[in-house]
Image (cartoon, helix red, strand yellow):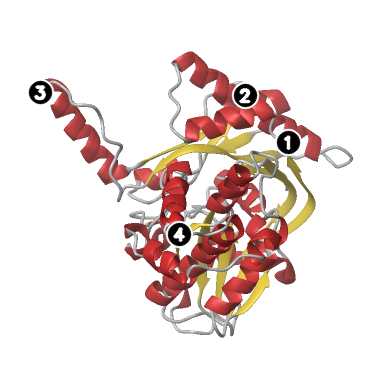
C-alpha cells in the first residue's frame, strides 16, 4: 500500500513528507521510501506556531485559524509529494505538537481563585497528573477533504488515555525494521527533542521484554534557538555544528545542567518545548555569564548537553552501553554533535539508520505512514513498556474524505 507520512517536529523547521510503500504486518513489515521531501511552513504560520508553543494566548477563533492553517500546509505537502508518482491510498499525519504534558508532570500554575474555582483547579491538577495531555494541530478531517485521501491523525491520545506518555511512538517500528540478531542497538532520534529505542539482540532470551525507550532531553532545540538569537534570526541552525566546533566546552556547566530533575527521572518519560523552551535557554545563558563564555563556547557547551544527556541516560537506565547507536533526525547531520556522542559513548559504534535501510532524514515521517497502516489493519501501534501505557492500543483516528465521522 502506498502511504504518505507527515510530521513537523518540535523544531518547527518544516513538514517532513514521505511517500512510502508499506506491506506485511509486524513480524514481516517491509517499507520502501518512494519519495521524501521537507516543505517549509509559510513564515507567518511558523512564527505563530512558535509563539503558541512559547505560551502565547489565543482566542478560540485564532486557535481554529491556526489549526486550519496547519492542516492546509500538511495537505499541500501531501499533494506535492505525490507529483510524478502514483497516488497514495492513505495519509498518516502526526500534525504539529503545540503542547505536551506527560502524566508524571504537573500542569501549569494558575492564578489564585475562589474556593469553588480552587476545587475545580485541584481536580484539574489531579487529572493532568494521572492522564497528562497532548495536542497536535492540523485537523485530519480537513486534510482528508483537501486531498481526497483517507487520513489518520491524533496518534498520541489513545496511549495517554491508557496511562502512557504518548511518546516515543516510533519504538515498535524500530523493533520491526532495525533489530539485529546478535548486536544490541540504540536507535537515537535527534530532532528538536531526542528520543531512543533500545533493542537487545534477538538471540537473547526474552529479548522483546527487554526493549525500552524514552525521551532523552534536548536534541537540536536549544542549539537552534541559541543560533537564532546570536544571529538575530539570520541563521536557524548551526550547519554541521561548524560554529560550535570552534568553541570550548564548559564542563562544570554541563554537569550543573545534567543535575536537573528531568535527567534523573527514570523512564518511561517524555518531554518537549514546554521544558526545553526559550525560557530554559535564557537560564542557560544566565548560567554561562559566570564563566565569561563566547557565543561559540555556549554552542559547544549546549552541544555537549545534548551529547552528555544522551550518554548519561544510557549509563543510568540501560543494562549497558549498546554496541551500536544508530542516529536519525536532523541532528544526525551535525558532525560536531556526532563526534561528541562518540566521545561520550566510549566503545559504541555511532552510525545512522541510513546504513541499515531506513532513511535517517525521513524516518519519523516513515514511522507515521506505518502507524496509519497499522491503524487501518487494526494492529496496535504502541509499546507499553516504552510509553508506560497499561496495554497495547490502536493509535490514531481515521477520517474518510467523504465526510464520515472519525473512527
Image position of 251 with respect to 116: above or below: below
Looking at the image, which is closer to me, 55 or 68? 55
Left or right side of 402 for 10: left
Outermost residue, right direction?
Answer: 84
Question: Which residue matches tag 3?
Answer: 115
Residue drawn at (68%, 69%) of the image? 352
Which is nearer the N-term, disc 4 or disc 1? Answer: 1
Q: Secondary structure at mark 4?
A: loop
Label total for image: 4
At numbered mark 2, what does the secondary structure look like: helix, strand or loop? helix
Q: Earlier in the sequence, mark 3 or mark 4?
A: 3
Mark 2 highlights which residue?
69
Query: Residue tagged by mark 4?
Result: 383
Tell whether 344 sits left or right of 318.
right
Q: Is residue 401 visible?
A: no
Q: Dot 1 lies on which element?
A: helix
Residues at discs 4 and 1 in contact (Cβ within 8 Å): no
Residue at x 52% of width, y 58% of height? 194
Helix, strand or loop at mark 3: helix
The disc, 1 or 3, on the residue closer to the chain's N-terminal end is: 1
- Work out whether residue 269 or residue 346 is closer to the camera in this orientation and state it: 346
Front label number (3 vs 4): 3
Q: Which residue is mark 1?
A: 78
Residue 302 relative to residue 24: left or right: left
Q: CA distance from mark 1 to mark 3?
A: 50 Å
Amino acid at each position: 500500500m502506498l502511504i504518505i507520512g507527515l510530521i513537523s517536529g518540535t523544531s518547527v523547521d518544516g513538514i517532513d513528507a514521505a511517500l512510502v510503500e508499506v506491506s506485511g504486518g509486524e513480524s514481516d513489515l517491509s517499507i520502501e521510501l518512494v519519495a521524501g521531501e521537507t516543505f517549509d511552513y509559510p513564515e507567518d504560520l511558523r512564527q505563530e506556531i512558535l509563539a503558541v508553543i512559547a505560551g502565547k494566548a489565543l482566542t478560540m477563533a485564532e486557535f481554529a485559524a491556526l489549526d486550519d492553517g496547519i492542516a492546509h500546509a500538511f495537505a499541500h505537502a501531501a499533494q506535492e509529494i505525490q507529483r510524478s508518482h502514483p497516488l497514495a491510498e492513505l495519509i498518516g499525519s502526526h500534525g504539529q505538537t503545540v503542547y505536551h504534558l506527560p502524566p508524571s508532570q504537573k500542569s501549569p500554575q494558575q492564578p489564585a481563585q475562589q474556593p469553588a474555582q480552587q476545587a475545580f483547579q485541584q481536580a484539574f491538577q489531579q487529572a493532568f497528573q494521572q492522564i497528562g495531555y497532548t495536542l497536535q494541530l492540523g485537523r485530519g478531517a480537513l486534510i482528508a477533504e483537501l486531498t481526497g485521501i483517507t487520513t489518520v491523525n491524533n496518534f498520541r491520545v489513545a496511549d495517554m488515555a491508557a496511562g502512557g506518555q504518548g511518546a516515543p511512538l516510533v519504538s515498535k517500528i524500530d523493533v520491526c525494521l532495525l533489530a539485529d540478531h546478535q548486536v544490541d542497538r540504540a536507535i537515537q532520534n535527534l530532532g528538536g527533542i531526542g528520543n531512543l529505542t533500545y533493542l537487545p539482540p534477538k538471540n537473547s532470551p526474552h529479548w522483546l521484554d527487554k526493549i525500552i525507550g524514552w525521551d532523552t532531553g534536548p536534541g537540536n532545540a536549544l542549539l537552534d534557538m541559541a543560533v537564532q538569537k546570536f544571529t538575530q534570526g539570520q541563521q536557524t541552525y548551526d550547519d554541521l555544528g561548524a560554529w560550535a566546533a570552534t568553541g570550548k566546552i564548559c564542563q562544570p556547566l554541563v554537569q550543573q545542567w545534567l543535575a536537573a530533575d528531568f535527567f534523573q527521572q527514570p523512564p518511561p518519560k517524555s518531554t518537549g518545548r514546554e521544558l526545553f523552551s526559550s525560557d530554559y535557554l535564557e537560564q542557560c545563558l544566565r548560567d554561562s555569564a559566570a564563566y565569561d563564555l563566547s557565543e561559540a563556547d555556549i554552542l559547544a557547551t549546549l552541544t555537549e548537553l545534548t551529547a552528555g544527556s544522551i550518554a548519561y541516560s544510557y549509563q543510568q537506565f540501560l543494562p549497558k552501553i549498546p554496541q551500536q547507536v544508530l542516529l536519525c533526525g536532523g541532528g544526525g547531520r551535525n558532525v560536531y554533535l556526532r563526534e561528541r556522542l562518540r566521545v561520550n559513548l566510549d566503545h559504541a559504534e555511532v552510525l545512522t539508520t541510513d546504513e541499515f535501510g531506513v532513511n535517517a532524514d525521513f524516518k519519523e515521517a516513515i514511522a507515521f505512514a506505518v502507524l496509519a497502516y497499522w491503524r487501518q489493519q487494526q494492529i496496535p501501534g504502541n509499546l507499553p513498556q516504552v510509553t508506560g501505557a497499561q496495554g497495547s492500543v490502536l493509535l490514531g483516528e481515521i477520517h474518510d474524505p467523504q465526510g464520515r465521522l472519525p473512527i
